[in-house]
Image (spheres, grey):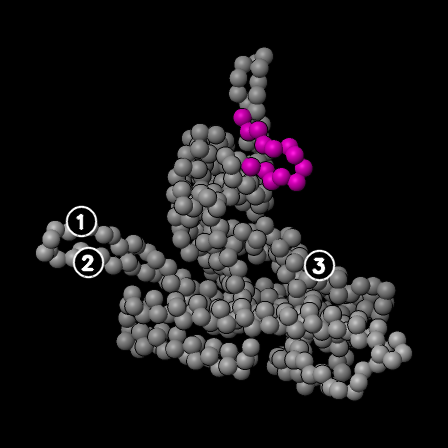
């Protein structure tokens, strides 16, 4: 795999995509359908190249991790020492054990070895350091544990700039045409969704005693506490954020499926109406998303006479099987509104049309002086993300009566 060729090609494709937008902006006009299609194709090529580069980095990381124990074992066995022939591998500076230890040293003491200060990929002009690759993966895993929307959505990672996503607004139609008559002219029309980068921040204060205690797993603690707080904040935005200084939630642009007749209850008939309001093409991958209190209220609905009452919702009780409703999984999200007047209480749809755009890397900085008078060190964390529902008809909801 020719790495330089891939990087060069990516730069060329990006320049072509940027030129299309610049041309339209210069003419003060919207993109034509041909330009939108070409721009989408170029973005697809960039994403494919990025995925290839990430796969290559992941493979190198596995090779290094596999080679280190084997190399150590050979050194301990007579006659199996290295031959002296140098082996060159290209590894991200952030993926090395050296950088991981240096990062922990930076958190504990604020001191970074001089040779690592030269790795400008790991630091910005404000003195912040990108977390090690291994630790960044830990944060991502914990975000998926705490955040139920991320696993449902289409999550992409970009480096810089605003991501333009062409979206089909209307679909052209065909027509029966008599012999010799003119062909029917009907074009698809496109709109555009933009993914920007909204910043989440937090400062965690750690005592000097804990920083100096090597038995305290500082990296695990920092990863967990930042992951939990970032996940809570972003999930609330993914559900109903207004897009002003934060991501835009799917409830902002989802389509109304039905309105409940009551302000404080929903019925199975209304759930059935919501189910069938979604096009069958979306239903095949759809999930229900609702607050745990709403799930509890639905689970209590009974039918029959007093001597023979039965629960309407008979879910599987077998361990390991997901909660199901009308054959589709139920996801509990406690950022969804609870049942009250005028609330969007149940969402049903294909969440792969909900896009989350993350910026590369979680950044940390150590604040040495701000809390020093109290014997504390501040650790400042920052992560950037955005979200948009790309097709409103892909997710529908029940709104209670007002």
Question: Does residue 337 show up?
Answer: no
* Residue pointed to by mark 3: 224
Say which element carries label 2: loop
Q: How many marks overall? A: 3
Q: Which residues are magenta?
A: 312-324
Assess whether residue 318 is covered by the magenta stretch.
yes
The one of 219 and 318 positioned closer to us in this rendering: 318
Give me the C-alpha separation between circle 2 and circle 1.
12 Å
Q: Residue at x 36, y 74 (%)?
A: 21
Direction top: furthest residue: 307
User: Eyeballing the image, is 35 above or below 171?
Assistant: below
Give me the C-alpha separation between circle 1 and circle 3.
61 Å
Residue 55 point in image, percent of width and height: 59, 69
Give me the C-alpha separation between circle 3 and circle 2.
57 Å
Direction front: furthest residue: 79
Residue 321 point in image, percent of width and height: 62, 39
- Using a 10 Å C-alpha cutoff, classify the residue at mark 2 as few (fewer than 14 neighbours), some (14 to 19) or many (20 or more): few
* Residue pointed to by mark 1: 176
Upstream in sequence: badge 3 or badge 2: 2
Say which element carries label 1: loop
* Residue pointed to by mark 2: 185
Say which element carries label 3: helix
User: Eyeballing the image, is 337 above or below 232?
Assistant: above
Q: Which mark is residue 263?
A: none
Q: Residue at x 66, y 40 (%)?
A: 320
């Amino acid at each position: 795999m020719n790495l330089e060729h891939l990087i060069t090609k990516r730069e060329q494709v990006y320049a072509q995509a940027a030129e299309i937008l610049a041309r339209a902006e210069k003419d003060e006009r919207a993109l034509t359908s041909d330009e939108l299609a070409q721009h989408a194709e170029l973005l697809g090529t960039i994403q494919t190249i990025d995925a290839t580069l990430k796969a290559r980095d992941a493979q190198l990381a596995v090779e290094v991790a596999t080679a280190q124990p084997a190399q150590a074992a050979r050194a301990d066995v007579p006659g199996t020492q290295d031959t002296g022939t140098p082996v060159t591998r290209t590894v991200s500076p952030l993926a090395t054990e050296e950088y991981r230890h240096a990062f922990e040293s930076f958190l504990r003491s604020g001191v970074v070895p001089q040779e690592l200060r030269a790795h400008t990929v790991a630091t910005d002009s404000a003195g912040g350091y990108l977390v090690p690759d291994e630790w960044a993966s830990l944060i991502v895993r914990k975000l998926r544990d705490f955040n139920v929307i991320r696993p449902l959505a289409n999550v992409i990672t970009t480096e810089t700039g605003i991501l333009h996503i062409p979206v089909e607004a209307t679909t052209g139609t065909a027509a029966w045409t008599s012999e010799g008559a003119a062909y029917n002219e009907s074009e698809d029309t496109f709109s555009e969704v933009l993914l920007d980068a909204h910043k989440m921040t937090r400062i965690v204060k750690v005592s000097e005693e804990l920083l100096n205690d090597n038995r305290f797993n500082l990296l695990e603690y920092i990863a967990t506490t930042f992951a939990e707080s970032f996940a809570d904040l972003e999930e609330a935005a993914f559900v109903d954020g207004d897009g002003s200084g934060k991501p835009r939630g799917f409830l902002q642009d989802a389509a109304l499926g039905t309105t409940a007749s009551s302000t404080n209850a929903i019925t199975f008939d209304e759930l059935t109406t919501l189910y069938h309001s979604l096009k069958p093409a979306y239903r095949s991958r759809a999930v229900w998303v609702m607050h745990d209190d709403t799930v509890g209220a639905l689970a209590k609905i009974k039918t029959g006479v007093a001597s023979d009452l039965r629960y309407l919702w008979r879910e599987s009780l077998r361990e390991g099987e997901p909660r199901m409703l009308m054959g589709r999984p139920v996801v509990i999200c406690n950022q969804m509104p609870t049942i009250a007047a005028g609330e969007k209480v149940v969402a049903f749809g294909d969440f792969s049309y909900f896009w989350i755009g993350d910026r590369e890397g979680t950044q940390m900085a150590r604040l040495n002086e701000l809390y020093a008078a109290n014997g504390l060190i501040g650790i400042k964390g920052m992560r950037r993300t955005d979200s948009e529902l790309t097709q409103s008809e892909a997710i529908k909801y029940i709104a209670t009566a007002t």
